[in-house]
Amino acid sequence: MGLVTLTSGVYSFALTFATSGINFAVVRLVSGSLPYDEVSVILDKKANKLVKNIMTRAFLYCLFFSSIASLALFFGARLIGKYVLDDLRTVPTLKIMALSLVPISLSSAINGYFYAVRRVYKNVIVQFLEQGVKITVISTLLIFIFPSQISYACLAIALGGLISELSSILINVVLYILDRKKHKKSNNCIVVFCSNPSKNSEGVVNFDVPSVFGSAFPVAVSAYARSFLNTIEHLAIPWGLKKSGMGSSGALASYGVLCGMVFPLIFFPSSVLGAFASLLVPEIASSYEAGDFKRIKRIVSRVFGFSLVFSVCVSGVFVCFSYEIGLFFFDSYEAGHFIRLLAPLVPIMYLDSAVDAILKGLGEQVYTMRINIIDSLISVLLVLILLPNMGIHGYIVVIFVTELFNTTFSIIRLLNKTNFKPNILKWIFKPILCIISATILSRIIFNVVLPFIFSTSFSSKPFLIFEIIICCALYIVFSKISGCISKEEIALAKRLVS
């Protein structure tokens, strides 16, 4: 996991260059071009031709940047592996990863299109199929084909990623072509890219051809800076751990446990909020274009409430069951230790993602990128200073400092932009009391009551999932009793699931 995470640090920068902000540009431009009332618009042949022209430009933009990134990573893999990563075992993996950059970039543009037109289910279909292919290929290669060596294991993961991305772009292209044909023949609104949509006297929208490059590249430049700093940070972590006295193998192992195992697990529940947040950008963008600030304020209120009430529950579960979860998933006490240390930060991290999505919808992507770049710069400096003296726990401190910095300034910007006032009692203090009560009661049930009744232990792995489910159910009950969540919010949550 340490070696995979090490190569991923370099790969992430190449991927940032390959996509170069195209996804956000597509979402922003397309959603901004839709009529605010979403009434069907009759478009002529000229408008349909504009759609084709703009999509062609978007694909050419993707091909240009992704080809440069792919060639640079492929032919520079040996130099990177030898002089940057200081491990030649990473070279074959980097070369395979380089081949996946072009299909990922093209898929990113198509995904942005589907998000903007609210046909998200098509992205979901592609992602499910892509992950299914990836899991199948990687598992097959690891178990049946490649011998049990670290370098071959990394190569198997890279090959699985490449094959899944190739399948993803093929499915995406087919779905996109079918989508364009379907809506071209109907009277439904056909989405086109436009920077300044306007309506004539008959209520039909007039469209101008924007510059895809001008929309995407400013965002991309900021993303380059942050991604570059993140890459330096990930390369500096093993270096700092070695300086603290850990051996090369031990440093890479601890790095792999924290970044390659614990982080994905910590962020896994946030996929619920991530799906929610990804839909916010077009919704808020359309409201912002129409000047409907009351709706924006209402959305912000719901996002804050939902994010905090949800993340406090997740945080409490991670604190209470950290070591059991570490053993359940990774058979590692070290992983459980890291989970417990990071668990109190979960509400901050989850809320930050949601706030960033809102700010992007409000056109504050430049401010968000500026804060993210400063965040990354602080992170690099702290890694270089703290890790040689504090070891892996120094990186935990770095995460706390940077997350608090980023979230604080993002929330301040959002509050100033929307005049929104969060309900601290309802969304923070009450949920904390509810999750404390829920975890204590669930512990009593599974460690005292049930063992007393059935004269057997309920602390084994199979019962962990049931105990967590009971804990979450108790949290919902306590939250409803205390007023953290109302009937309207429960109904809203059901609609969001749909």
Image: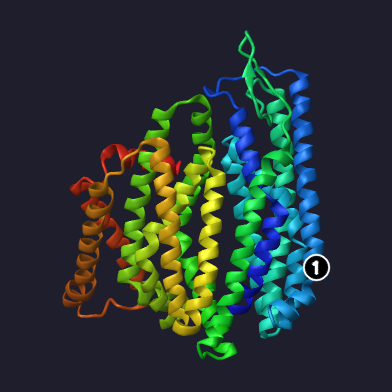
Instruction: Tell which residue pokes out farthest to the top in this image.
Output: 201
| Depth order, front residue of 357/147 | 357
Crowding near the residue tagged with mark 1, few <14, some 14–19, many ≥20 C-alpha atoms within 10 Å: some
Residue 115 position (above or below residue 52): below
Q: Residue 407, percent across and down?
A: 42, 54
**Is residue 145 shown to the viewer in this render?**
no
The residue wearing badge 1 is 74
Query: Image point 61% across, 12% down: which residue?
Result: 203
Say if residue 335 shows up in the picture. yes
Image position, residue 144 (x, y; %): 69, 79
User: In the rendered image of this protein, does residue 319 appear above or below residue 30?
Assistant: below
**Left or right of 199 on screen, residue 270:** left
Q: Is residue 61 left or right of residue 39?
A: right
Location of residue 250 with respect to 477 vertically, above or below: below
Q: Which colour scheme is used?
A: rainbow
Place of residue 376 in the rendered image (x, y in percent of width and height, measured from the top left): 54, 62
Query: Which residue does the image show at 43% across and 73% down from the upper left?
Result: 396
Q: How many marks?
A: 1
Q: Quadrant of residue 122?
A: top right
In the figure, is residue 168 to the left or right of 271? right
Q: Which of 378 and 48 is in front in this view?
A: 378
User: Which residue lies at the image location 26% right of the left edge and 48% below the top edge?
Assistant: 424
Q: What residue type is labelled 1?
A: Phe
Q: What element carries label 1?
A: helix
Quadrant (top left/top right/bottom left/bottom right) for the N terminus: bottom right
Q: Which of 372 and 203 is in front in this view?
A: 372
- Which residue is found at the position 59% from the left and 33% from the top? 31
Instruction: Give x and y (percent) for residue 475.
Output: 26, 56
Q: Is residue 176 left or right of residue 312?
A: right
